[in-house]
Image: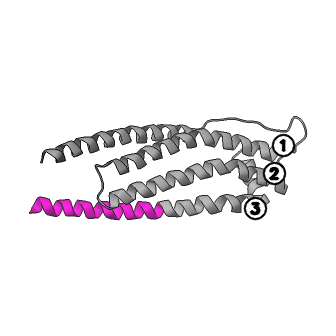
């Protein structure tokens, strides 16, 4: 009786957690969709970030340069949305009590691939943004910089961990199916 109650409590806690993670994922998706257009529409904000975070001196803030910056970030934004969709789906499975099955393992694996692709897209996006903002500068003041940060490497590591966990979950699902066939 006590084990049954503990199992019910654990399922209820997991369902609550799943709802919170799905809510956070949805809010993050809204941010991914809304913040970039808002950012690139405000030249003063772009200038401040370019100076402070990207170490760019002279930048072009005309509408074409800012449109180039927005377009440069679209692939990374799209991949972020796909990753958030995988989180949404994964925690939907968890919320329904679907733990040792192929569906959550697939979503976890797709999340891992999304993070690996994001790791590749972010440095490229950063490079193209810098190029878009400095392309109109005189010769010698244009910047083409390709860099990796610890954030990019964290995406790589997290993606690899997700892929490994996905494989472990697939194997656990296979063993659970085999055991269920014996009963």
Give the CA distance from mark 1 to mark 3: 18 Å
Q: Which residue is mark 1?
A: 135
51 shown above or below 5: above
What is the crowding at mark 1: few (fewer than 14 residues within 10 Å), some, or many (at least 20)?
A: some
* 6 is within the stretch colored magenta: yes
**Residue 41 falls inside the magenta stretch:** no
At mark 2, the secondary structure is helix
3D distance between C-alphas at marks 2 and 3? 11 Å
Instruction: Estimate the x, y position of residue 143 in percent, counting from the top left.
Output: 79, 38
In the rendered image, the quadrant that contains the N terminus is bottom left
Chain-order first, disc 2 or disc 1: 2
Q: Position of residue 122 (x, y in %)?
A: 62, 43
Bounds of the magenta segment? 1-24
* Chief SS of the magenta region: helix
Q: Residue at x 36, y 38 (%)?
A: 167
Residue extending farthest right: 138
Q: Which residue is mark 2?
A: 65
Relative height, residue 92 to residue 116 (above, below): below
In the figure, 8 relative to 138: above or below?
A: below
Judging depth in this view, the residue of 33 and 126 nearest the camera is 33
Left or right relative to 3: residue 159: right
The residue where tag 3 is placed is 41
Q: Dividing the picture into quarters, in which one does residue 21 lie?
A: bottom left
């Amino acid at each position: 009786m006590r084990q049954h109650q503990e199992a019910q409590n654990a399922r209820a806690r997991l369902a609550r957690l799943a709802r919170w993670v799905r809510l956070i994922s949805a809010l993050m998706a809204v941010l991914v969709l809304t913040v970039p257009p808002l950012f690139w529409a405000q030249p003063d904000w772009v200038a401040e970030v370019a100076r402070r975070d990207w170490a760019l001196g002279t930048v072009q803030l005309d509408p074409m340069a800012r449109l180039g910056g927005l377009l440069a970030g679209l692939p990374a934004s799209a991949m972020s949305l796909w990753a958030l969709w995988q989180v949404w789906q994964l925690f939907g499975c968890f919320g329904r009590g679907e733990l040792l099955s192929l569906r959550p393992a697939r979503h976890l694996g797709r999340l891992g691939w999304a993070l690996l692709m994001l790791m590749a897209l972010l440095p490229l996006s950063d490079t193209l943004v810098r190029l878009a903002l400095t392309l109109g500068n005189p010769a010698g003041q244009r910047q083409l910089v390709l860099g990796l940060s610890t954030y990019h490497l964290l995406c790589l590591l997290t993606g690899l961990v997700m892929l490994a966990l996905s494989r472990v979950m697939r194997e656990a699902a296979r063993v659970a199916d085999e055991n269920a066939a014996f009963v």
